[in-house]
Amino acid sequence: MATSTPAADGRTGRTTDPALRAPVARPGSRLLHRLVWLRLGLLLSAPLAWMLLIYVVALAALLITSLWSVDSLSSEIDRTWTLDNFRTLVENQVYRDVTVRTIGVALAVTVIDVAIALPIAFYMAKVASPRLRRMLVVAVLTPLWASYLVKVFAWRVVLSEGGPAEWSGLGSPGYGLTAVVITQAYIWLPYVILPVFAALERVPDSLLEAAGDLGANSGMVLRSVVLPLLVPGILAGGIFAFSLTMGDYITVNIVGGANQMLGNLVFVNAGAANNLPLAAAIAMIPIVVMVVLLAAIRRTGALENL
Amino acid sequence: MSLPTGADASTVATSGDAAATAAISLRGLRKQFGDVAAVDGVDLDIADGEFFSMLGPSGSGKTTVLRLIAGFETATAGTVWLGGTDVTRAAPFERDVHTVFQDYALFPHMSVLDNVAYGLRVRGIGRKDRRGRAEQALDTVRLGQLGGRRPHQLSGGQRQRVALARAIVLEPRVLLLDEPLGALDLKLREQMQVELKQLQRDLGITFVFVTHDQEEALTLSDRIAVFDAGRIQQLGTPREIYETPGSAYVAGFVGTTNLFDAATSQRLLGVRAEHAVRPERLRITPTSAEPTTADEIRLDAVVVETIYLGTGNRVHLRTDDGLELVALEQYTGSLDSAAHRGDAVTVRFARADVVPLAAAP
Amino acid sequence: MKPTHWRGRVTMACLSVLAVSVLAGCGSDEDKETDAVEELGEMEGQVSILAWPGYVEDGSNDPKVDWVTAFEKDTGCEVTSKVYGTSDEALNLAKTGDYDVIAASGDLSLRLIASDEAQEVNTDLVPNYENVFDFLKDSEWNTVDGVNYGVPHGYGANLLMYNEKNFDSAPTSWGAVFDTEELERNKGKVTAYDSPIYIADAALYLMKTQPDLGIENPYALDEEQLDAAVALLKEQRKYVGEYWSDYLKEIQAFETGDSVVGTTWQVIKNNIKNADVQVTLPTEGATAWNDTWMLSSQSENPNCAYAWMDYILTPKANAQATEYFGEAPNSPAACEETADPNHCETFHAGDEEYAEQLWFWRTPIKECLDGRTDVECTDYAQWTQAWTEIKG
């Protein structure tokens, strides 16, 4: 340390405060710096615990609960293992019907949303001026601020007898599955537009120009360049629309007429019937459907581009 | 089909019937973005088989001219002729020109081979035929083995070549290259320059090359148009551009130069007009070492800084009357630079090496 | 299973029920008293109440709606209250032991008693009990084996509502929603209450129209009887436009004409601004509800709890609470106290003839409620399963 005293530092003529040269005494930081795993552990422990609690434990709890049964009078849960709930699901036609109906509605919503989202997102990302684009993004996002219930009740009014749908001359399909598809398609549309829009924004304009330059007309550019590059965005949006519709039980209650979907069965069994184990078993159906769907998509290799 | 007439003689360096045979003719081309004129009246003829460079800093309008030729932008005024056909309003896919993009614009979801075959595919050419032609194009750019890869698995230079192959497989009359080497490192860039030049010569097609690198433009081009503020400032061969810059702007942009304003010129040369002299024309000698001759100019100066370049030294000087000069000393044999910081020296250059500049427009 | 202004909040249900049932599983089952208190002691200074929304109002929802503050002033018992949305949610909350008093409908009260969550109530310690209509006292949903487990609150019936434009003459029978010929003319515009308990409405109709089935009590159905009710409801399903569980939803549907006939509550009819919509109590009678103020077996504040039960039975407080909620008060004296002088007339309070036609909600259990012992009845879980199948 003697060489760094001001006197010995005469060569540059500058003096240096020894405190600036001394190492900072923070043993904790030094320990953290050295032990990479400790640093990572501290950093990740909170989110990991959260993940574990929210996802793994909740799913496991669901699975375990579905293997229990309920005493009907006292509503006490009987914690002996039984497959009765799943037997009920398999043996009763009604659960198959409701599952098929729910998947059908979810598919219809997904297809409609993707079909509407593609041109809108394309216009937003590639045609509109930056100013208009910002306004459109806001316009797409704004409905997300409104209460879900308010939106569904609004559709109930729109589709009611003598309601706006009839004034407009388009006519109303009345309350039923069609109304559910329309309402759900409206509610989840922003969740489809945004990922498609984000995917489109990531496609450089030069790719579109290059395709045109190489002789492709607009249709061919869309088909051979834009659409394949949008697959991740479309998948993300489609999975949103599909899974959110699969789980919904409010819209069908409000505009679905006399129809019920899987969510209603879960709700009725968890709430009114107080049969949590059966509700858990029914809740496994959309989970299984989603897992199968994702596995199928994965097999096509489409997820690799995500 | 009418031919373009009224070519401005001052910007057309080739013979009078250039428009008839030119691969590309631009007449009074303007492009306005809002209030800004990105291209402000460009007239230009590019001959068949020419390696033509458009040189200028970013924002000078050179890329916009290229995009107007390709059809990605629509001209505000003026016309674009390709091989004697007016294509001003034609869509990109209707023009017999192809572009190599600065970011290469390779399709990330296709293999290299599919990228190259894309133009053939959209033209409805059969799978087998297009595969053969694409492979041949890949061979031309020496990437024959990499057809199965995805673009993201390639290096920058390889991607560059795929972009080239994708364009040349369509055998265009004109290839437009938008700063194609800008993203490559120096060594690769020099190698690609040579390959580009060879390719152009072998294929015999017209290259229109946009760059902001003056050295690249000088080494590759048959002719160069120097752009500034949406206009062509000078049009000529690399030698003309370098040796006899038409303006202070061109002299300053292309290479390093010593500029003499009108007053200085009056004092040194007895002519009241702007002049320039290239640094490599300046010689540095010890003070008053040699007698002066009539066609030589001698100035006493002090060395401000000497910068080692490897191939020589760049010496910054200040004359006794405050003129700042730059000289380039080449190593010849045992030369050990006479110029050290603070030395008093004499700067000499031939009167003939001083070039008069046209008044800036 | 009742009309409340908050029924629209279906959203909260699933997760809260899930969370609550997990908590309930942790509750201790020890030391539950069942013997009635002999005499009251000192007020504990606090009481915790679990009730339907609108039953325990302290002015925080609407400054003009407040009958809790007066109670607190009189007794020094500070009230904390919790509202619930379904009887099943209430069952789970009650099991936590955090509540001294519980307002329970007939489909909940027996379950609370069966699971030892309710204790005997000594009605001698509730002076205002004597005001209560006799037909509400010692009923099957508040009394087991002669032991009182609570004091009655208000009551209301599930009525038949119809749009008179769609009928040549006013319907007088539930056949309007169960008879195929009647249903045909209103196809797609029929509505029904969306709950397994609605099976009792069908059973009531069968009880009157198909005596061969031998239904004595619409809440005591053996397998065969349940099957008959389910078959009837499946036939009705073809004509149903929508089921309702949300009271705002039914109001809107009748106002627009999306629904023209179906089951309803008086309070819903009162809110419909369409002069063509009428209600009637059909000749077959109707299902109904009557709530009971019950005392938790785990109560730590029994004295304040008794004080509350007595207070809410005072004519003034009972009139305020039942009128705000939209049901009949529990005593003639309360009818004198209603803000709307016609309230009791509108809700047929004290009309015993009317009340005799009502089958108050009860929880169907395996042990037949009508006293049959030769056969096992269907329980609520089976009803729930059946309801799912009816809706399809």
Image (cartoon, coloured by chain):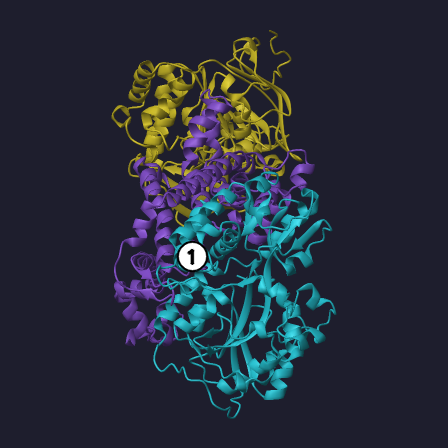
| Chain painted purple | A
Q: Where residue A240 appears, x then y in whole percent?
A: 44, 45
Q: Which residue is mark 1?
A: C221
B130 sits left or right of B16 in the view? left
Structural crowding at the residue carrying mark 1, measured as other residues with C-alpha within 10 Å and reported as few (<14), some (14–19) or many (≥20): many
From the image, which quarter does the N terminus of chain A lie in?
bottom left
Q: Nearer the viewer, residue A205 or B100?
A: A205
Q: Chain of mark 1?
A: C
Chain C image colour = cyan
Q: Nearer the viewer, residue A189 or B110?
A: A189
The answer to whether residue B300 is seen in the rendering is no
From the image, which quarter does the C terminus of chain A lie in?
top left
| Chain painted yellow | B
C182, above or below B131, in the image:
below
C266 sits left or right of B186 in the view? right
The answer to whether residue A51 is seen in the rendering is yes
Q: Where residue B99 appears, x then y in whole percent?
A: 45, 24
* Residue sitting at x 40%, y 17%: B170
Task: Kindly identify the amino acid type of the residue bearing the numbered disc 1.
Answer: Leu
